[in-house]
Amino acid sequence: MASQLQNSKICFIGGGNMAAAIIGGLAAKGLDKQNICVSEPWDVNREKMAALGVRTTTSNVEAGQDADVLILAVKPQVAKGVCQELGASWAERKTLPLVVSIAAGITLVSLIEWFKLSDGRTPHVVRVMPNTPALVGEGASGLYAGSDVTAAEKELVTSLLSSFSKATEWVDKEELLDVVTGLSGSGPAYFFAMVEHLVSSATALGLSEEQATRLAKQTCFGAGKMMVESSEDPAQLRRNVTSPNGTTHAALQSFEASGFKDIVDKAVKAATSRGEELGKILGQS
């Protein structure tokens, strides 16, 4: 872990599952838990955070008062009020914290406007779109930085994300975060749905649900591991397992006849478009 992050005071506004995943990753990398503070209004979540060994509070202002890095991990619907509250509390600070937002859909323009201090100063902001496999240390994240974010700050955020994300991709246009949302943000649900239907099909053909579930889960896991560890691209891996006129070939022909490529394309585009819509709606709230 970069020494810059190791010595930073990190504040989480929001103590949900993603915050827990990040904290778990940071702790595993050796970050001092007493350098981490979580503001969380709900008793149950706050107690879970306290059980991780970090400092907790119900006050956003208290949590963020001396933070070097502030991670905005609240529901998008409450983000505006939280940002404005924090910005107002930083009037006496000479140096503002680096803000890392994982609040889905909230654009950089909105975040900067909401955080703006009375004297016109604004914090540097990085937007991150993580995904739920971060909960098991196997996340994939897309990132976009404001033009004022420095190379050192980018390095710090990359180091922070490496604690729970195996793929960390910076994009050079903010709208591409909506594509990341459609691909890896929503992507885990696509694979869950695929396994769900595999189990259903195999059960209908005679396997017990327990057997079908175990085989389908391991097949999904094993295929994913092969893709990550192989130097070959997914298309070549598919060809490697497809014998001419064999069983896999028959299944893939059925996929093709059903328009599988178009189905996936439409799904990713639908999620991307919805991300764009939410960004516009939430930015006006």
Image (tube, rainbow, N blue to C red):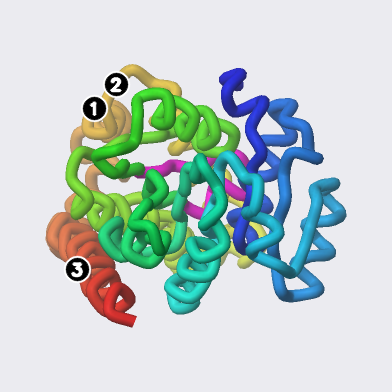
Q: Position of residue 117 (x, y in %)?
A: 42, 60
| Marks 3 and 1, how far apart at CA | 30 Å
Other-residue count near label 3 (Cα within 10 Å), few / some / many at <14 / 14–19 / ≥20: some
Residue occupied by mark 2: 232
Marks 1 and 2 close (CB-CB < 8 Å): yes
Q: In this rendering, would 195 be left or right of 121?
A: right
Task: Indicate the secondary structure of the residue bearing disc 2.
Answer: loop
1 vs 119: above or below = above
| Residue 135 among magenta residues | yes
Residue located 71% across and 67% down the image: 59
Q: In this rendering, would 221 be left or right of 277?
A: right
Q: How many marks?
A: 3
Q: Quadrant of residue 17?
A: bottom right
Q: Quadrant of the C terminus?
A: bottom left
> Relative to the observer, which residue lies in front, 277 or 63?
63
72 vs 7: above or below = below
Task: Indicate the secondary structure of the residue bearing disc 1.
Answer: helix
Residue occupied by mark 3: 273
Magenta highlight range:
131-142
Residue occupied by mark 1: 236
> Relative to the observer, which residue lies in front, 253 or 233?
233
